[in-house]
Amino acid sequence: MTTPKDQKPTNPTGLHPSPADLNRSEQAAAMLAQEPGETLTTNQGLPVSDNQNSLRAGSRGPTLLEDHILREKIMHFDHERIPERVVHARGAGAHGVFELYKSMSHYTKAGFLQDPQVKTPVFVRFSTVAGSRGSADTARDVRGFAVRFYTQEGNFDLVGNNMPVFFIQDAIKFPDLIHAVKPEPHHEIPQASSAHDTFWDFISLMPESMHTIMWLMSDRAIPRSFATMEGFGVHTFRFINESGNSVFVKFHWKPVRGVHSLVWDEAVKLAGKDADFHRRDLWDAINQGQYPEWELGVQIVPEEDEYKFDFDLLDATKLIPELLVPVQIIGKLTLNRNPDNFFAETEQVAFHPGHIVPGIDFTNDPLLQGRLFSYTDTQLSRLGSPNFHEIPINRPIAAVNNNQRDGHMRQTIVKGRVSYEPNSLGKGLPMQKPWDQGGFVSYGEPMEEEKIRVRSEGFADHFSQAALFWRSQSQWEKDHIVSAFCFELGKVEIDAVRERMVSLLGQVDRFLAHRVAEGLGMAVAPPAHGAEALPYTDEPEMDTALSLANSRKNSIIGRKIAVLVADNVDEESLVICKTLEAEGASVKFIAPRLGEVKSNEDELIKVNYSLPTVGSVLFDAVFIPGGQQSVETLCANAHAVLFVKEAYKHGKAIAAHHNGTLLIAQAARSAGVADGAFKGPGVITLSSETISDSFSKSFIAAIAMHRFPERPDLDAVVA
Ligand code: HDE
């Protein structure tokens, strides 16, 4: 059993661990974490003799109020829930490490960006925005991408999203935006969806949202996994170097596995097949040692270039196109440890964009400025006390010394009688430190302005970057965007809202507007009142960084491969499984029922999943081994046929060895197309009896492509 002695911090200097100790888990363990003990006790440590029966007057009599053990247990249970986050309620977290590639001392004095030898522990939480804690992972939504760096100078939280821009320019509109997207107040419908009247009513009256809306309607809003999403700090921040010189900086996270998304039909089916699809993927990847990785990139803009662009750096509805300012890669984030306890870590972590370190500072972005108030404030209702920074996951590794005291749930026991400053009784400690001794000093930006409520003129163009995004997409991405608009606006019940939206789309791109209008069975209306922004630009440049089609496609680490098997499967075919695993993929055997199947060489193969419990949407690729009897069984199994049809429809890599190809033909027939119609990019077959190297390589290359959205007539496939 853990004794109170075991639970004391190991650091003799008090409750704050030594700054030299970088390992969060060790710190948390040293402070409060405990393994389950041997003897069941109450919260007071009283050993419990009976956890099955409450105390009553006789075996059939009433329960006695005296039962302090029952009362304590039920009371604690009654209060187990805390309010969920008002936004970003559903999420998953993981621990990891940040390693710097090169010193950034030229630009910033931030301690963790100086020395490539220093490894900084991190905790990351990914989230959806609109849905409640129990909603599905694959809803169309922005994803939160919040990273905490536990640095020697305090916590630095980069609280970003997987999209580089935001819906609104000024924080004062945030409650309106969120009220519009959340379930409608009269009937609390729909959950985790923007496809309803109030969201589109608001958006149709907020032309500044058009750029982010383009991202939201793209496949970026339905990522394949957290590990294949980009992350962005969104706002422009400042770096400040030792000499006090400042540059503007935008932060980017670039996933090493490339940026990959689902398609809408998959996202919808996944919500039913596995509502925890993203959370499980992250958990499994880390458990299996397939650690997700991102590179940290920065776009640096010198102070003198502040007004060089035709958009305002302070406007969070704009990005800096990478073709104007390239992203410099400066380090790598690796997530390598799952939390020990979801509530204690992922739920109680309290991020705040205001958690910065010397060498990093804010700009006057009016969205960022509003956020600086919100995050500490919201923790008071969520975590219940101003002492939330003492929860282990929130404790900095840097020492905390100040004169704050008391309050609900205070844990630190500060010795002595002094809790004020200046003081002489406490030798004047703790003492403030100037910049050159490590103190935080705000950038001395000159200010001499009127006090007014006015939007800067530089924020006025709401359409050019939306158009840039649209024009930078590949054809299939454009098709998906059009379908997304048709779906979302198709759920809108008020004609006027749809009309205003289509009219706004006309200011992004006339062709886009016409396609959406056609899908909705309506005409394109003239620009709505209040939407008369800058004139439509005919030929904005393309930015290749904006298209998923240009993402990295050189790895299959973390991909899930389904191998469809039944009795008498050909042992020779299965040699490819080892090759796939050696490349970092997970191979799962799926059969008509659980248990084992016997190969043609009498080997027993453990079945991971039965066909009725899974679906191709849970996997990245399918392999169909040979073996006459195995394939015949699968061809006669509706789940197996659907599996292949869906994988084909969703553009996934499919490989079949020897007579495994019969299942592909059967799937094509059942999809209403000719036997041989399931061909084309990403369908790899091998008729010879032995598996060849080139077959394995082609399959691996196809999986790395992630998907083949340009396969002909995918919409015609019934699946
Ligand atoms: Fe947040 N946001 N936000 N946000 N946000 C919260 O803080 C808020 C914004 C983001 O995994 C809340 O602790 C305002 C932009 C993430 O725990 C709350 C405004 C970006 C997370 C809050 C914004 C974000 C939050 C809810 C407009 C991308 C989840 C619970 C002024 C750069 C962090 C909480 C986690 C969470 C307020 C806009 C990212 C209420 C007022 C822009 C990733 O404080």
Image (cartoon, grey):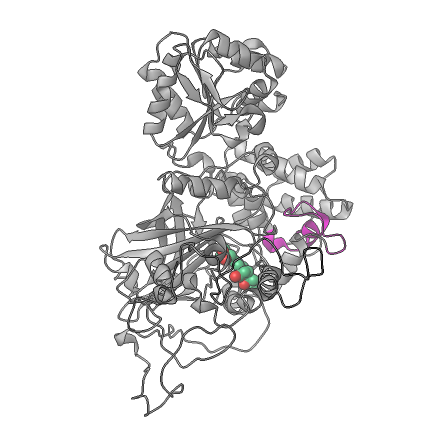
- Residue 242 at x, y = what percent? 26, 69
Left or right of residue 647: residue 329: left
- Regarding residue 675, the answer to whether it shows in the image is yes
- Image height of 582 relative to 570, above or below: below
Q: Quadrant of the N terminus?
A: bottom left
- Residue 234 at x, y = what percent? 47, 55
Left or right of residue 260: residue 269: right
Q: Residue furthest front?
A: 58
Q: Nearer the viewer, residue 361 or 95?
A: 95
**Where does the magenta region start and end?**
185-209
Q: Residue at x 58, y 67 (%)?
A: 381
- Image height of 622 relative to 15, above or below: above
- Image height of 440 relative to 476, above or below: below
Q: Quadrant of residue 404?
A: bottom left
Q: Nearer the viewer, residue 547 or 627?
A: 627
- Image height of 576 relative to 497, above or below: above
Q: Nearer the viewer, residue 286 or 103?
A: 286
- Residue 301 at x, y = what percent? 36, 58
Q: Residue at x 30, y 79 (%)?
A: 433
